[in-house]
Amino acid sequence: MSNIYGDWLKAQRETAGLTQQQLADAAIMTRSHISHIEAGRRAPSKEDARRLDRALNTGNVLSSFLPEEDAAVADRFEVARQLEQQAKMIREFALSLVPGILQTEAYMRAVLRTAFPPWSEEECDRIVVTRLERGNLLANPTTPLVWALLDEAVLRRRVGSPDVMAEQLMHMVDLAESHRIRVHVLPQDLGAHPLQQSMLTLMWFEDQPPVAYTEAIYTAKLYDNPAMVERIQAAYDLALSDALSLKESIALMRATAKDYGHHD
């Protein structure tokens, strides 16, 4: 991913004789946030850019040349994937497909077979490896905290064979019953809800502001503007308040897996 902005910031900081921590103190930011901007993992908000300009005495250069909002989807996904590895809390909302970090390999492959134009077996294998690596986040027994809010359509839409669906649902049941994740299902008879337009990932960190990531067909967007992230969080909380309880959600997933042919 191109990182002209981050490289330029680093050059200006070093020219000013500042460490990342000194620049962070002067701009009222965290050192890790500065590090992520310089590495190209995050774009500064407009307010961050103004603070950096003031701290570095660079006029409005950093404010004027913020990365374009229409950056490539692949770039945005890669940034989101890297942030996912650093998050202390992740809250997912899925509209029609199981979130990537919770997918089984068979389910992943069934999803990838729907791509257009079709991917080669080699491309599919590469993507599966990446997604399985993402799922390794859950190997740590305590962090990150993961909540999954699922539209009931995720359970009902058959991806792959009935056996694939049964395995996928029981994988999430096992994670929930082992207290590794929380899962809540938004029932179909609820009707419209605040998150019905796209999938969503919310991420919180130890030493940097939270972000929101949304994805739809051929589009993706990473939000780190505090006001927008707060607004998206509120929509998530509102939808969550209408969801089934953890116990009810596990029971529904187990029953649906049984409908697909799974037997305890």
Image (cartoon, rainbow, N blue to C red):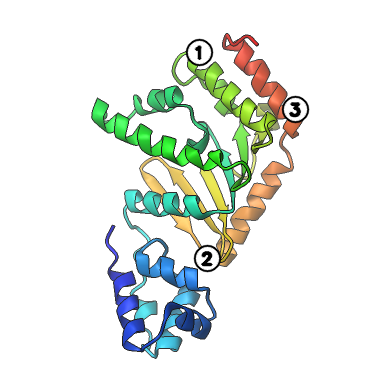
Badge 3: residue crowd in 10 Å (few <14, some 14–19, many ≥20): some
Does residue 138 lie above or below 235 as drawn? above
Residue at 42 percent of width and 63 percent of height: 42
Instruction: Check the picture and name the quadrant holding the C terminus.
Output: top right
Q: Residue at x 50, y 38 (%)?
A: 101
Mark whose residue sits in front, 2 or 3? 3
Amino acid type of the residue tagged 3 in the rendering: Glu
Where in the figure is residue 55, as x and y percent of width and height? 45, 87
Q: In which quarter of the image is the N terminus?
A: bottom left
Q: Name the residue under label 3.
A: 248
Dividing the picture into quadrants, the one containing residue 227 is bottom right
Residue 83: mark in rendering? none
Residue 197 visible here: no
Amino acid type, label 1:
Asp
Which residue is at the far front? Answer: 140
The local secondary structure at tag 1 comes to helix
Residue type for callout 2: Asn
Question: What's the CA distance linking mark 2 and mark 3?
Answer: 35 Å
Q: Name the residue under label 2.
A: 225
Q: Distance between the residues labelled 2 and 1?
A: 42 Å
Q: Is residue 40 left or right of residue 196?
A: left
Identify the residue under disc 1.
163
**In the image, 9: left or right of 264?**
left
Which residue is painted at 63% across and 12% down in the image? 258
Separation of residues labelled 1 and 3 (CA atoms)? 23 Å
